[in-house]
Amino acid sequence: MFPRRKAVSELNHLVFVASALRLNAFILLVLVAVPCAIAQETVLIRIINNAVLVPVEINGRHFNFLLDTGSDGSAINTSTAADLKLIPHETKKIQKNFRDLVVDVTVVASLKIGNADFHHVELAEINLTPLSEALGAAVDGVLGNDILEQFAFKLSYSRRTLLVGPLARLGTLGKSIRLRRSRGQFLVSIALVSMPTELVLDTGTNSTNLSWKTWEDLTHVWTPKEIVEGIERAGNPTSQAILVCLPLVRLGSVTIKNQVVRAQQKSDAGSFSSEDFGGIVGSDVLQQFETTFDLQNNRMFLTPDTQYRSDPYRYVTIGIQIAKNATGAVQIMSVWKDSPAAHAGFKPGDLIKAVDGQPIDALSLEQVSGKLHAAEGTSIRITIERNAETSTIAVQTRSLLCVHDRPQPKKKPSIPVGHHAQAEVPSANGASSAN
């Protein structure tokens, strides 16, 4: 009897110990998980031509990654991956705006945004040189939705801040807009004039782009007053587009007036080749708001940014697109049809050397762009290099879009604001500088 009681007693003791160990293990897991939670923090970001560059840390080194809600996965520049001696472990297919690619995939043990540490992050290796040249700044990688949906954040273009943390601690949220998740991207319902559609939410591109099918449908219910032809996007392959001014755009209950958008030609590959793809909402729209992203719960919030000021000269210009080439020189990518620049004889490939007698070598792309915008009728002297020969051409600015509702200030703005064309970003995106 006694041995049997002792055995039962020992068995009960073992069950108790095992239960206690499981409980302690659970408590330990909870305690370990807490420090990994995203604490409230303000991350200072760079805004270059409305592209958001976020500082990240990989293996103790600091880089600039593009904030890109249009990309389902994150990526790293091929040269950056080589510099970090990262070794690919597989390949996969990805779709960009205008092409489909097979890329190497590598893994970093740790990627930090501020104090938030993400472990075992897969990164597609993509050549981001065209994007860097279009922006005039190094882009080392892309933060896609695989990372961005893990935390809530508020983006302010005017303050150049990214406030991350629990949604309840991100301040005033504004008007809620539901998002629809589709294949790693987020679609937002939008009304273009009177036509409802869905576009991909895309912070990775600086312009809102409509697909050829969306544009075709829109022209059945609305006729534009002005069309600018000859718009190019940087990268390979290039793609032609037009610019139009929409009198009214609605995002949920939020109304935007006189919004310029692009309408792309049909592409042979990539997202813009599909009839089911409506297009993308870019940072040209989002910059007007403080936008809170809660991607995990398929929603965002818009609060009008009281510090946002639209540039009255954005489309009072000469009609060229510029980007920095591989040597760092400012090169004309395209000349818009029937623009002042076209009539003056500018050509794609011309290198801009000076504006109004002032050399531009030390200027950023945005600063150069700003010199090409001014009140209508302003004469600008541009020195170019073509076939190793230099010449100076005088050209006058003209209102090219949204003419019907544009005030005509007398003075040139003190802070030059440029609009960069489209250099492709490694999602369903695209960005360069339009002048």
Image: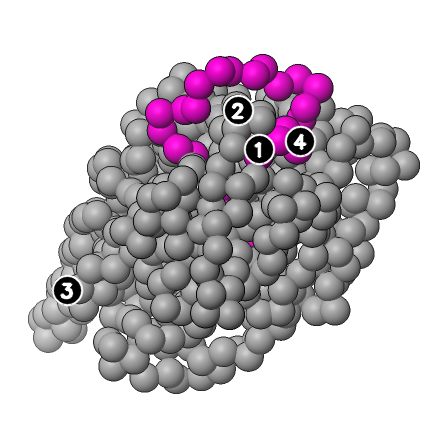
Marks 4 & 2, CB-CB < 8 Å contact:
no
The disc placed on residue 314 is none
Q: Position of residue 383 (x, y in %)?
A: 45, 51
Residue type, label 4:
Leu
Q: Is residue 214 above or below residue 121?
A: above
Q: Which residue is mark 1?
A: 397
Q: Earlier in the sequence, mark 4 or mark 2?
A: 2
Q: Position of residue 338 (x, y in %)?
A: 72, 44
Q: Which of the two residues, 162 or 20, is positioned nearer the viewer here?
A: 162
Residue 375 is labelled as 2
Report if residue 406 lies within the magenta region: yes
Q: Is residue 4 magenta?
A: no
Question: In this figure, which residue is indicated by the disc labeled 4?
Answer: 401
Disc 2 to disc 1, C-alpha distance: 7 Å
The CA distance from mark 4 to mark 1 is 12 Å
Density class for disc 1 (Cα within 10 Å; few <14, some 14-19, many ≥20) is many
Name which of mark 3 and mark 1 comes first in the sequence: 3
Mark nearest the camera among 4 and 2 is: 2
Which residues make up the magenta segment? 396-424
Q: Is residue 144 left or right of residue 86?
A: right
Q: Residue tagged by mark 3?
A: 60
Please name whichever residue, 202 or 343, is drawn nearer the observer in this view of the structure: 343
